Image (tube, rainbow, N blue to C red):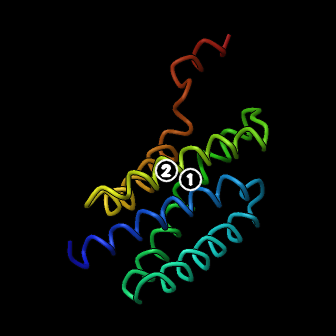
Amino acid sequence: MGAWYTIGLFVGLGVAAGVLAAGVLSSTRAALAGAAVLAAAVAVGAAFLLSDWPEAIGAGVGSLLGALGATPFVRGALRRGGTPVGTALLVALGALVLAALALIPIVGYVEAVVVPALAARLRRRAGQTHAGLRILARD
């Protein structure tokens, strides 16, 4: 395997680290920035220790994308009554699955695109949940 595989692997592991940090730390808006920065610092440091700078950059970008992508899901779960510990455990399991999937060639790159895309879709559909029922409430 070439450098494209190891860069993709570290991108995927960075996405998993960002998702994990967002799940554990994004109970407030200030914690979101902290989660993204912490995940990026840890991912870049670990990738630079294990490999070279292209992998470290990939891990940093992946962790930022993972944190930004997971935050709407975590905040929505907490807003709807989920407990912080339960939400963090479920998101940690999801991050573990993402890390395992990053071992498959090219999947790390796909994770870096799909996780933020799902978050953007969630934000776009946020107000449309019960749009058809609002007309019944006018009586």
- Which residue is drawn at the image coordinates 49% and 86% (left, top)? 48
Secondary structure, mark 2, is helix
The residue carrying mark 1 is 70
Q: Could you tell which of marks 1 and 2 lies nearer the N-terminus?
A: 1
Q: Quadrant of residue 17?
A: bottom right
The label nearer to you, 1 versus 2, is 1
Residue 131 image point, x, y percent: 53, 25
Q: Residue sitting at 64 percent across and 58 percent down?
A: 22
Q: Which percent across, then down, holds residue 68?
A: 55, 61
Label 1, label 2: how many angstroms apart (C-alpha)? 7 Å
Give the crowd class for mark 1: few <14, some 14-19, many >=20 residues within 10 Å.
many
Residue in the image at 45% along x and 69% along y: 62
Looking at the picture, tell me which residue is in the foreground, 28 or 129: 28
What's the amino acid at mark 1? Ala
x, y percent for residue 97? 48, 47
Q: Is residue 78 left or right of residue 112?
A: right
Give the amino acid type for the residue marked by disc 2 in the picture.
Ala
- What residue is shown at x 26% (from left), y 60% (from top)? 105
Which secondary structure, mark 1? Answer: helix
Where residue 52 sits in the image (x, y, percent)?
A: 40, 88
**Vertically, is 109 above or below 89?**
below
Q: Is residue 73 left or right of residue 32?
A: left
Image quarter where the N terminus lies is bottom left
Q: CB atoms at circles 1 and 2 under 8 Å apart?
A: yes
Task: Identify the residue at the far bottom of this view.
Answer: 53
Residue 58 falls left or right of residue 33: left
Residue at label 2? Answer: 119
Of 84 and 117, nearer the camera is: 84
